Amino acid sequence: MFLYYSILVFITCMVATAYLIPKIISVVQYKRLMDNPNQRSSHYIATPSLGGIAFYIVFVISLSFNHYYDEFDVSMSILPGMTVLFFLGLKDDLVVLSPRTKLLGQIIACMFILVNGSFEFNNLHGFLGIYEIPVWLGTLGGLLLMLGIINSFNLIDGIDGLAASIAIIILAFFAVIFGLLEFKFSFLSCISMIGIMIGFLFFNLSKSKKIFMGDTGSLQVGFIIAVMTVRVMTANEGQLNHLPFDSSYNPIVLIALLIVPLYDAVRVFTIRVLKRKNPFSADRDHFHHLLIDAFKISHWKASIVIATFNIFFLGIILLILRAFSIGSVCFVILFFLVLMTVYSIKLKKKIISNLEKEEKEVPKIKLFKSPPSNFHFEKREASIIE
């Protein structure tokens, strides 16, 4: 019975999102609330960017139906937190908010989750030999973790299909984990958001009816993934025994799962600080921008490359965990991070080299003080297009 209900939830969320988004596109176009391109944009025409409105409507409605399986009133913590981020993102998409205001709103949203007893972060289950930790330290750690995930998803939403694709991969993995743990409400929440992401991708990858999720959407998606991450971390020892890996490996598995958004956020923030720029300032130093600018590939191809890497990296880590120690796994993660950093530097150099070649290939225009003798002016009537 639960399996059929889960399939129904998935299909309903996908169809409902696909139904709502054209309505949102029409309203945004009529009110001229489009996202106009600038020097760092990856699009060239004004495009609707409030797809997150559909996310909020569909997910909140799904909460009311999935609440039947919510044993710990988790939905009553998710709803206010998601509402705060929805209005925060909506205002940022329309008028732009300061980084300080956005951070304050994110902290308030996260605290709605962390004050719930089901999310009490007080045990690392033997990771690096650490078991119980003070509640205040766990709450602080949980807050920093959630803020990192929310902002990292906000940052990778820079090209068509990327944020939604990575979200589907992460949420699908969490759905499997919650299925094994028998956390039915968390499982349904993941399934609901996956349906929403797929319904959104039909339009995000479309040429004629394109829409972006905007901050309105990326903040919500990051928030749900952050909630699911903390939910796994705060499960008790008896529940974690149902997982195919030791509970002490939880942080490592979650790092492997979230490697794409977290790595890109840390790398970009570090570059901006080294350049003495505001860490929240906009630029084209994100890994997805480097791929597109270096190889001149389309958005969906870059998204596929990055999403495939995410799956590959997670698979490698899970395989290594079954045969080697946690020290070996940490070494592999560090190796991959160094490798990605070196590759990012090479991509940046390739972009600079391409720009220099393009400048040399631009033909020089010869300027005449007066028109040559064989030059004829052609008089044409101007046409007015109403």
Image: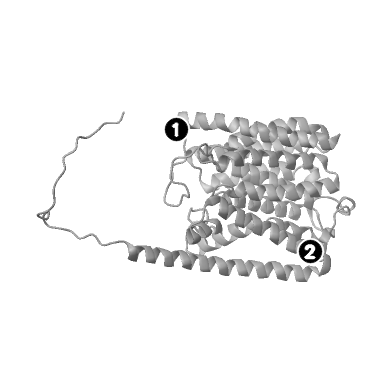
For the residue carrying disc 1, how many other residues have a C-alpha within 10 Å: few (<14), some (14-19), or many (20+)? few
Residue at 52 percent across and 69 percent down: it is: 346
Image height of 59 relative to 304, above or below: above
Residue 279 location in percent, x, y? Answer: 52, 56
In the structure shown, which secondary structural element does the residue marked by tag 2 occupy? helix
* Residue type at tag 2: Leu
Q: Which label was assigned to residue 319?
A: 2
Residue 239 location in percent, x, y? Answer: 87, 50
Residue 287 location in percent, x, y? Answer: 55, 59
Image height of 338 relative to 132, above or below: below
Residue 50 location in percent, x, y? Answer: 54, 37
* Residue type at tag 1: Arg
122 sits left or right of 221 in the view: right
Question: In this rendering, does residue 298 appear at all?
Answer: yes
- In which quadrant will I find the N terminus? top right
Q: Which label was assigned to residue 32?
A: 1
Image height of 11 relative to 261, above or below: above
Q: Which label was assigned to residue 199?
A: none
Q: Quadrant of residue 187?
A: top right
* Residue placed most toward the observer, 175 or 78: 175
Q: Quadrant of residue 197?
A: top right
In the structure shown, which secondary structural element does the residue marked by tag 1 occupy? loop
